[in-house]
Amino acid sequence: QYEHAYFDEQCPRSKAMIDEAKHYIPGGVQHNLAFNHPFPLVMTKAEGAYLYDLDGHRYFDFLQAGGPTVLGSNPPSVREKVIELLKDGGPSTGLFHEYEYKLAKKVCESVPSVEMFRMFNSGSEACMAAIRVARLATGKKNIVKMGGAYHGWSDQLAYGIRLPGTKGLQAHGVPSYLFKHTQEFFPNRLEALENRLKRNRLKGGTAAVFIEPIGPESGTRPLDLHFNKEVENLCHAYGALLVFDEVVTGFRIGMAGAQGYFKVSADLTIFGKVIAGGYPGAGGLGGKKEYMKYLAAGIQTGDKIHKALVGGTMAATALSCAAGYHTLEEIERTDACSNAGRMGDRLTKGLQILIENHHLPFVAFNQGSICHLETVGTMHFFINWKKPWTITSVINETSKRKKEMEYMGAAYMAEGLVTLAGSRLYTSAAYDDAMIDQALEAFDRVFAHVEC
Ligand code: PLP
């Protein structure tokens, strides 16, 4: 029932637009996450917990724009402030705006390890800035990250990352010499990290250890409870900066991010997504003063330190900072992280019951409002460490399940569910119990037809 003909009939306007767009946009869409089988659907509105498409269908939105909208999409409380700014001041001045100060102060007050903050255009840019700062501050060369972790698409950090469906294990278009000083270690393997740090002592040292604090790929492969604390200890022992990439977890796990939950004090913290509340220009770097001083803009009297070259014409606009500031205020006022987290718990429990009822080889788990529906077997590799997980084994498993995954991608859409690539589901504070239960009924209908 979820075949091509179904979509041709139900979504003719989307199909026509995508066919046209293919002439002007490579692949027909602008965003990696916009792909769907058999063709991408065109969305016209995102509001609260729902998405609406060009052919008039409504969807439960578990993509939530890829993560920024903890309050739900386009919340009126933030929108009104943004409209006020646009009417009275405009989106950008090119100089300094009060909202830059307000947002920075709010971030510093919320995350204990962050004493200073600078806004960028994206999480990727903030990661690039973090590398520069770490190298300047430590005088060391190497950057160590966890296998499979995503820290944006810059040359240095694309190590080990590839687009699904492309051949080979490495990012394409990046010469391997650019990875000379980027290294990986297996998630949850502290001894591997320590060995790496030891070996690096003779090879330029380690400037920073980058961590996705709930595990690689936004927690798809979760970490042992004490892992982050142990990494913090190792970083101190070897004089490397601990960089927490909280692009996904910042202001979603809680106002103090994942580091608040794990009681870890990062040296540098990368923000993205929620930092601009679903508006453009979502990236930021925060940290201790002794490191953030390398990002001081302009030339200051008595300035003797070498500073990091960073930039961005449209970074830290009044628009992104106002949207971010009012989003953080509203999240705090309404305790939105906890509310979204409760919805995540309800969704995950419900999914696990459905999985068992339908005898499917899947696993559902969550870290608050970040939910995972593991369907391709990676969990198996990662739970059972005696059969270690490798990138190749996951890719093989994924391609074995390609048909099922295509089926499920189409089935979700047909049943009014939008997820992130079928395997990640963000909840927001715009959901309530009844909506989650209704969404679970739709998952039930999808699962009823899965053959594994
Ligand atoms: N770091 C993590 C953990 C992410 O999940 C992402 C994006 O999803 C990034 C960095 C890159 O952020 P951006 O897409 O804003 O460049």
Image (tube, rainbow, N blue to C red):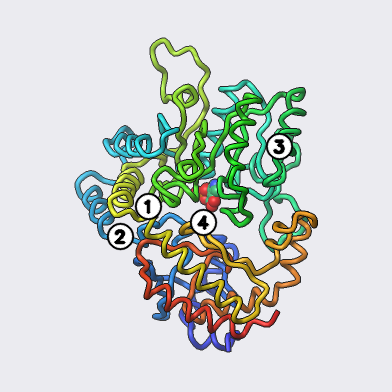
Label disc, if present, on residue 398 of the rendered structure: none
Q: Are marks 3 and 1 in contact (CB under 8 Å)?
A: no
Around disc 2, counting alpha carbons within 10 Å, would you say few (fewer than 14), some (14 to 19), or many (20 or more)? some
Frontmost of labels 1 and 4 is: 4
Frontmost of labels 3 and 1 is: 3
Name the quadrant of the C terminus.
bottom right
What's the amino acid at mark 1?
A: Gly
Mark sitting earlier along the chain (2/4): 2
Q: Which residue is mark 1?
A: 277
Mark sitting earlier along the chain (1/4): 1
Residue 394, can we see it? yes
Frontmost of labels 2 and 4 is: 4
Q: Quadrant of residue 316?
A: top left
Residue 191: image x %, image y %? Answer: 73, 38
Describe residue 283's horizontal placement relative to residue 163 as left or right. left
Disc tally is 4
Q: Secondary structure at mark 2?
A: loop
Describe residue 415's horizontal placement relative to residue 196 as left or right. left
Identify whether 177 is placed above or below 1: above
Q: State the residue at coordinates (37%, 59%).
A: 339
